[in-house]
Amino acid sequence: MGTKKVSYSDKGVNELPIDKPVMYKILTGTRNTNHVGIAQRGRAQERILEHIGEIPGTSVSVKQFSSIAGARKEEARVMKQEQPKYNKNGK
């Protein structure tokens, strides 16, 4: 599935695709992952906008999946590998 990266702002987030489940990463200016999460089809923009102002970042990257199960599997892998600062207890 496709990956897209936009600025971590209201305008950038509104450019994200919403037609499939996604795993999203909130990234710092040095491309470190501050937070990783998943969103069901149609909720990507809403979920990411909930984090603006709470979790620092400069860009957001989303990867689309054909199912929410695939997004969850990738989220678990990324959390284990990258250990994002703003994910609570590995979740």
Image (tube, rainbow, N blue to C red):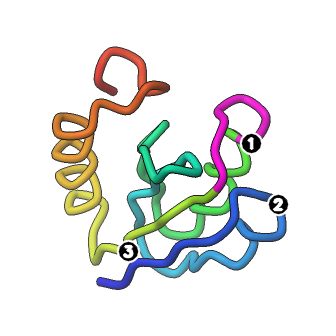
Question: Vertical placement of 76 versus 25: above or below?
Answer: above
For disc 2, the marked residue is 10
Q: Residues within 10 Å of mark 3 (few under 14, many from 20)?
A: many
What residue range appears in magenta? 52-58
Check contact, mark 3 vs mark 1: CB within 8 A: no
Of the image marks 1 and 2, the number of the one nearer the N terminus: 2
* Amino acid at pointer 3: Gln
Of the image marks 3 and 1, the number of the one nearer the N terminus: 1
Left or right: residue 64 versus residue 61 is left
Q: CA distance from mark 3 to mark 1?
A: 21 Å
Left or right: residue 12 versus residue 27 is right
Q: Label for residue 64?
A: 3
For disc 1, the marked residue is 52
Q: Quadrant of the N terminus?
A: bottom left
Please provide percent x and percent y for residue 71: 28, 59
Task: Name the element at disc 1.
Answer: loop
* Amino acid at pointer 1: Ile
Q: Residues within 10 Å of mark 2 (few under 14, many from 20)?
A: few
Residue in view at x 33 percent, y 27 percent: 91
Viewer-nearest residue: 17 or 83: 83
Q: CA distance from mark 1 to mark 2?
A: 8 Å
Task: Name the element at disc 3.
Answer: strand
Q: Residue furthest right?
A: 11
Viewer-nearest of discs 3 and 2: 2
Residue in view at x 70 percent, y 79 percent: 15
**Can you tell which quarter of the image residue 69 is in?**
bottom left
Please provide percent x and percent y for residue 58: 66, 52
Check contact, mark 1 vs mark 2: CB within 8 A: yes
* Amino acid at pointer 2: Asp
Viewer-nearest of discs 3 and 1: 1
Task: Name the element at disc 2.
Answer: helix
Left or right: residue 58 versus residue 76 is right
